[in-house]
Image: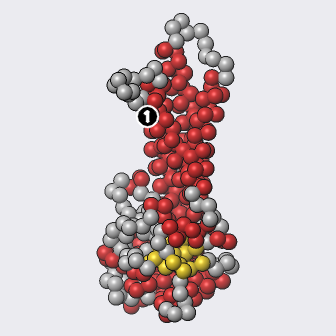
Amino acid sequence: MRFFEQQGRARAETRKLLLLFALAVLLLVLGINAALALTWRLVTPGFSGYPAHFFIVNTVMTLVFVLGGWWLETSSLEGGGEKLARRAGAREAWPASRFDEQKLCNIAAELAIAASMRTPQVMVLERAESINAFAAGWDEEDSVIAVTRGALDGLTRDELQGLVAHELSHIREGDTRLNMRLAGMVFGLELIFNLGSSMCERDENDRRSALALPGLAIMAAGFLGWVAGRALKAAVSRQREFLADARAVQFTRSKDGLGGVLRKVAAGRGAGAIRGFHPAVQHMLLVGQQAGTQWLDSHPPLAERIRRIYGRAMPALSPGADPAQDALAPTHPGALL
C-alpha cells in the first residue's frame, strides 16, 4: 500500500464531499424558497408580489431547522467519549487482572506514543462476540477506544495493533467529531421533511388544511435534501475509513495487522457485526453493516478495503490463522509501499 498517496486521496475526496454537502444545504434553501414562492402565486388571487421579507423569513426558518437539528443531535454526546461508550455497553479495561486486556492497554499506549498522541481510555465490549471496535470522543482529551470481546479472543497481537491503529487514526483526524456534526445536519434536513409531512396530515374530519399545498412543497424539498445529505455523509464516512486504514498501515508498518483483521471478518467471524450495537455508534465501528445500497453505506465494502491494503484481492482468513504465515501475504519491507 502506498499509504501516503492513499491518505492524500482520501483527504482530497473528503474536502470535495464536504463542499458538496454545503452545496446541498444551499440548494435546499433555494428549493424551499422556490417551492413556497410558487405556492404563494398559486394561492393568491390577483398576485401582485410577495410579502415583506418573504424570502428572508423562509431562509432563516430553514436554517433554524437544519442548525437546530445539528444542535439536538450533537448535544446527545455531551459528556464525552466515555459516556457514549458506556451507552453502547462498554466497561473499563481491567489490565491488572486480565492478561488480554493488559495486552490491549499496552498496545494502545505504544501506538499513541508512536503517533505523538495522548493515550485514549481503553474499554471493552464484553458481550460482543464479533470482531469489531470503535473510537469515540470530541477530541484527544476525552477519547475512548472500545474493543469487542470477539476481537480480544480472535486476533493476534499484530492484528490488535492494526485494529487499535485504525481507531487511533479516527481520533487523530477528528473523524468522530466530523461524523457527528454531519449526522446532526442530516437530522436537521430530516426535520424539514417532517415539518412538511405534518402540514399535509388530515384532521379528525379526514380533511387537509390550507397548509397542505405549501407543506407538500416543503416535504418534497426536504426529502430531496435529506436523501442528498445522507448520501454525502455516507460518502464522507467511507473516505475516512479508507484514510484510517492507510494510517493504520503507516503506524504499524505492516499490512498483515489490519489486513488480517479484515480478512478474518470476511471469513464470517464478523458477520452481522453491528447487530446489537447501540445505534449511536454503528457508523463509528471498524466494520459496518453492508445495507446493499452502497451509496448509503457508511463503510466501504470489505473486499475493497482489503484490496487497497494489499494491492490485490486476498482470500479470507480462518479465525485461528496468522496472516504473517500466509504465503499470499508477503510482509517484506518492499511490500509496504
Q: Residue at x 49, y 93 (%)?
A: 99
Q: Quadrant of residue 67?
A: top right
SS for callout 1: helix
Q: Which of 335/102 is in front?
A: 102
Going by the numbered disc 1, the residue's amino acid type is Ser
Residue 333 visible somewhere in the drawing? no
Q: Is residue 329 above or below residue 236?
A: below
Q: Position of residue 289 (x, y in %)?
A: 38, 63
Q: Residue at x 42, y 53 (%)?
A: 296
Q: Which of 184/330 is in front?
A: 184
Q: Is residue 167 above or below residue 200?
A: below
Q: Position of residue 195 (x, y in %)?
A: 49, 35
Q: Position of residue 306 (x, y in %)?
A: 41, 72
Q: Quadrant of residue 64?
A: top right
Q: Residue at x 39, y 85 (%)?
A: 154
Badge 1, how many Cα within 10 Å: few under 14, some, many 20+? some
Q: Which residue is mark 1?
A: 197
Q: Is residue 76 above or below residue 333?
A: above
Q: Is residue 145 above or below residue 280?
A: below
Q: Position of residue 113 (x, y in %)?
A: 66, 83
